[in-house]
Structure formats: structure tokens, C-alpha cells
Image (cartoon, rainbow, N blue to C red):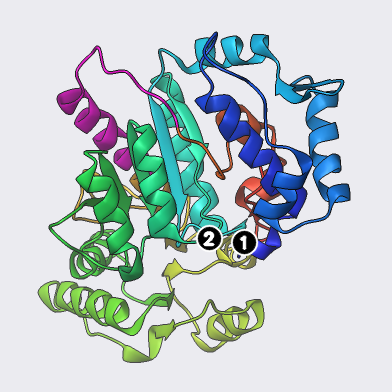
Amino acid sequence: MSDAIPQYLKIRQYVFGLIANAKAGGGSLKVNTEAEFCGIFGVSRITVRKALSQLVDEGFLVRKQSLGTFIRPEIVEEYNMHIGKKLAIGVICGDGMITFLPDYYTISLGKIFERLNESGCFVRLIYFNGNAEQEAGQLSKGKLDGIIWLTPGRKSIPTQRIFKSCNIPLVSVFPSFISDEFDCVATDYYKSGYMVAKYLLGRGHRKIIYINNNPPDVEAKKKAGSMAAFAECGVEWNDQLWHCSTRSFTKTQIQSILNDSGDFSAVNCHTLYTDYLKQQLADRKDVQIISNICRESVAVSEGMPGILLPVAQAGSIAAGMLLEKIKQADPPDKVRQLFLDRTIIEPDTYKLWRALPATQKTGNSGVTGDW
């Protein structure tokens, strides 16, 4: 949550917000005093000085004797030039206060960054430090060009409505709720179960293991769709091969499932340990493994909203949908001013993501929200 981010980094984010809002040649570039920062963030002067000194050393700020600390004018000009002609797309994960990202988010973010980078967009992660609705109102004053929200919950509906009321295009990816009120890339779970089962049955598989961790309502729809495909193909359904849990199966549990299943020809899995599963079955060349937490897109659909969408595919489609919405709605002469106060920003998030070790991009260690 928000406490996971060091206070000096929050101050750093705040200053980047001031830089983003500053206009070249317009008004004072003076930042808050140390005492004001102490009051805003409830920290000591030592913490404030640590953050400001780092920004001075990096060339973002300059201290003037007896006058205070100022943003360097050349930084403002460079910043304005950098983003002036680019679309500014915000990305929110979960409840907006996630600091460690599992496979689901890192894979989706990777595809989103790739798609937006191709279009020359300015991409940044939005992190709500406090009241999400209040901060959404502040963000809306600055006019973002669009927002992609990964897995928003029902509690995020008021926040989404704030963005919508300010005419900021927003597309959700795999929300835990489906509503006609917002645009989203979602999975019809019944159809997902049906299509995957039909695909595997069509390839001659007759003994399929299902290893899934999903909410009960999702599992019920997937199972119903899978059973319908078996019935349609005249294949007997073996309920003992269906394994589901609200939490991800451990490696030990997966190993036990494989050992108890005897001879099988395919595995349909939705688990964080897909790579481990592949390792265990590496010598079984006859076994096909399908997972929708993966980069590979299973060729069982056209990849359109409302049907089976592997995670990697969904992120790319959502970004494409958002860009099309912006293209249709935005006048070319729109004047944009980014309000980045108290949000995590980076000039080129995509390059930072590319620079991360492979284990952080995809592994269970996760990626911190501070990058």
C-alpha cells in the first residue's frame, strides 16, 4: 500500500508533478520550502533534504542563496518539448495502490507499453497515495489524454466516473465487474472454457487436466463451458480432472495433481506456476499445455473483446481501443497540461521496463511500483 513507498520518494514524485505543471517562461519556478514539505508529508527536515538534495544533484533543481530552491528553467523547457506533441496515457493497476506486480500485471504492462510506444505516447503509472476519488479529481483538472486501468474493482467505480465526467477516455482490462457504463476488454468465461476445451478436443485430446485459480463464479462459468464442449463432441467428462482454488496452487500441489492423474494428453492451467508446470512436463512431448497467464496467444479466437483473451493479448487490445477512442474524440488543437502531482512518473517508462531483468518482468519476485 502507500506506506510501502519511502517518504522521500513521495516528495520526489511531488516535485516531478511541479515540473510537469510548470510552463516555460511563465511565473515563478520556486518549489515549496523545507518547512512546507514537512507539513505536507509529515516528515522530518532530514527526509526533505535527502529528496531535494538528490534532485539538485541530478540537475532538476537549483538552490539560490537566501531565496530558496527552484526548478531549473531549462528542465521545464526540455520537459515541455519532450511531451508537448505526445499523447499522455495514464496506467492504473488494481486499486491504484499496488507496489509489487505479479505476472498478471507485468505481462499486461509490457504489451501496453509496446503498443503505446509504437504510437509515440507518453506513458506513466498513476499511484494513489491517499483518497483515490480526490486525487482523480486533481488529475482530471490537468486533462490526461486517456487512461488504461488493469483489473479495477467495484470500489473504483466512483473514481472511474470522475474521469468519465471530465471526458477522459478510459478502457479497463479484465475488470472484476462487467458494466456497460465503461469500456473494457473482458473475457466471457463460459465462452473461454468452451473454446479452449473445443480446441483441445479438436486436436484429439481426450484426457485433459484443468488446474485453475479463480473466483468461484468465474470457475463455474469456465467449467460449464468446458462441459458443454465435451458433450458436443461426445466425450465423457471426468470431474476428477478439474482442480480449482481461489488461490494459486503451490508447486507441491501441482506435482501431486500430475502424479495422481495418470496418463493424460493436455493441461489447461491458470496458475502462477506455469513455468514450473512446463518444466515438470518437459519430457512429455505428447502433452499440450495451454495457459491464459502467458505471453503466447493460443490460436482459438480472433482476439476481440468478449471472448478468450490471453493476458498479453488483452493489454495490447486495450491500448489499441484507447488510442482509437482518443483519435475519434480529440480535436487536433487540444491544449494539454499534465497534472502529475503525487503520482509516479518517468519520461520513458517503456525503456525502463525494457531495462529490467527478465526475472522482474515476468517472475514471481514482482516489480516494485517505484520504477
- Where does residue 8 sit, x and y in percent of width and height? 76, 48
21 versus 2 height, above or below = above
Which of the labelled discs sits on residue 215, or is there none? Answer: none
Q: Quadrant of residue 256?
A: bottom right
Residue segment shown in magenta: 315-338
**On the rendered image, what quadrant is the N terminus found in?**
bottom right
Quarter that holds the C terminus: top right
Task: Residue at 51%, 26% (x, y): give it.
Answer: 21
Q: Position of residue 353 (x, y in %)?
A: 62, 36
Give the residue displayed 23% in from the left and 13% down from the top: 332
x%, y% of residue 298? 35, 50
Label 2 vs label 1: CA separation?
A: 7 Å
Q: Position of residue 340 (x, y in %)?
A: 51, 36
Q: Mark 2 belongs to which amino acid?
A: Gly
* Residue lying at 39% horizontally and 85% vertically, measured from the top left: 241
Tag 2 residue: 130
Is residue 316 located in the magenta-colored stretch of the structure? yes
> Of the numbered discs in the image, which one, if any, rests on residue 2?
1
Asked if residue 93 is positioned above or below residue 177 in the image, the reply reads: above
**Disc 2 + disc 1, Cβ < 8 Å:** yes
